[in-house]
Image (cartoon, rainbow, N blue to C red):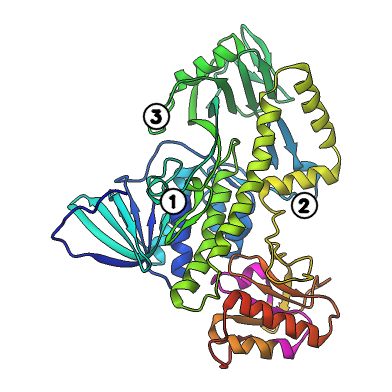
Amino acid sequence: MIEHHETDRPSENADVIIVGAGPTGLMLAAELRLAGVRPLVLERQPRPRDTPKAGGLGGQILELLRHRGLLERFRAACTGPMPAPRFPFGGVHLDLTQLPDPPMHALPLPQQLLERLLGERAGELGVELRRGHEVAGVSQDSAAVTVDVSGPDGPYRVSARYLVACDGARSRVRDWAGIPFPGTTYPEVNRLAQVTLPDTATVLDNGDLDVPGFGTVRAGFTRTDQGLLGVGSTPGNRSVSLYTIEDETIEYDDDVPMTLTELQDSIHRVLGAHLPLAGSTRLSRFTFKARQAERYREGRILLAGDAAHLFPATGVALNAGMLDAVNLAWKLAADLRGTAPAGLLDTYHAERHLAGARTLLHTRAQVALRRGHDAAAEALRELFTELLTDEQPLRRMGALVAGADLRYPMPGAGPHHPLAGAFAPDLTLHTDEGVTSVAGLMHAARPVLLDLAGLPELRRIAQDWGRLLDVRTAKTDDRPADALLIRPDGHVAWAAGLGESADGAASSLRQALAAWLGTPPSTGAGHDQ
């Protein structure tokens, strides 16, 4: 633990300090403001980074953005056409285009643009973000966390009830908190680019590239003794996605951008031939690690995003980190309000550590598929590809990669409704005010009791939780339950089975409300609409 710097400036206070203004930190800040919490975001970089990192956003976080009424805003900012639902998986592809309702989608949204949108959203909600303010030390006691900060105008100190480390893979806060970060670093360097081909190269009708002096480069993945080349292209379009993997021992500085020459050199080493490139719109380089913090909480310090987990595959880190933020925010807010039931904040670790382990499971499986070079590995990839021609395994793998298959454990002995713990289905709802949806009820990030069967006794029970809960009545076609209690993060906390007895539903609802919202604060009327 670094000692506090002495300073004449007075100590400041915030409800929650967030260290790091990447996508996870900005999402957390916005969610806390929706819950009435006053966060302070500290970011050591003086301005937003322009080094290309993630090239898109995909998975379950897109459904959560729909729940906040933000999805169309993010779609409107996309830099290219919506891609077909085809995703790399360990050197093969998950081709979800054959499914009528794919469980996984993506937005082509470069991380710089994503961070700008999230920053704008946080600013609209009144979040205070300080750029160029580096955390120099952290200490905590039973009541607060104190942070020493080095800012443009000198050192100062700020305290809060909680601190959340969103400061990335090399998190200093995680180290100061003494939280182990075990796992594996793979000897791979991955280079990902969106490039433009010169007129001398041709994209064939099947997506292959015809390269002068070399011949045909297949669409998809090409393996050689030196590494792997991935090609994604569209006939008639000279913009092509390229991806190389090589085993290297060089340590690259993440803040030093990759160049087009570096990419061409990598392609040359893998293919043994020069691939002509006219230009690029995205160039990024990264290594793969499989790591997960032993615990996501140490006293009043919590971890989220890359500070908590690193995955050895592309396309999942942003989804996981931003979902960490949404899960944590409403629980922190309840604790700060003094309404949280005992142990609520500890469910953050229980639930999101489970989610992180699930993501590590499939990304480590991708490593096994990707890194094997012998005949047995080729047979494994061939068999896996064959399995993915069937709908059930394809749907299951798509949901796994998206994080849409996650079902959190529910408190109590049960039995629980099949929807309990899962993300709420986005039902079309018919109300007295018109047609809406489950997502339309969740814009304010508040818990909702949704009565789908006209059960006034359940609505009367909910009134005991007063203004902590919104109560809604609606009808829907093919309703999956008679009533749903939906948490602010979109997961179902409780559900009444179709035709369940009124006494049984009332008793289990009261238990669920107490477990998630605490002791009833009043007997005043809630928001019943």
Q: What secondary structure is found at the residue carrying circle 2?
A: loop
- Callout 3 secondary element: loop
- The answer for how far apart the CA atoms under marks 1 and 3 are is 19 Å
Q: CA distance from mark 2 to mark 1?
A: 33 Å
Horizontal and vertical percent position of residue 78: 54, 47
Lateral position of residue 302 relative to residue 474, left or right: left
Residue 446 sits inside the magenta stretch: yes
Q: Which residue is drawn at the image coordinates 45% and 36% (left, top)?
A: 52
Asked whether 345 or 486 is in front, the reply is 345
* Residue 305 drawn at (x, y percent): 50, 49
Query: Hey, what amino acid is under mark 3?
Result: Asp
Position of 484 with respect to 523 (left or right) is: right
Residue picked out by circle 1 = 166
Residue 304 position in % (x across, y down): 49, 53
Q: Quadrant of residue 211?
A: top right
Question: Dot 1, how many residues are within 10 Å of its Cα: few (below 14), some (14-19), or many (20+)?
Answer: many
Q: Which residue is mark 3?
A: 253
Q: Was residue 432 drawn as part of the magenta stretch in this picture? A: no
Left or right, residue 520 beside residue 143: right
Quarter holding the C terminus is: bottom right
Extent of the magenta region: 435-458
Asked whether residue 234 appears in the rendered view, the answer is no
Q: In what element is the residue under mark 1?
A: loop
Instruction: Name which residue lies at 45% across and 18% down.
Output: 261
Give the residue pinned by disc 2: 101
Mark 2 crowd level (few <14, some 14–19, many ≥20, 10 Å Cα):
few
Q: Amino acid at mark 2?
A: Asp
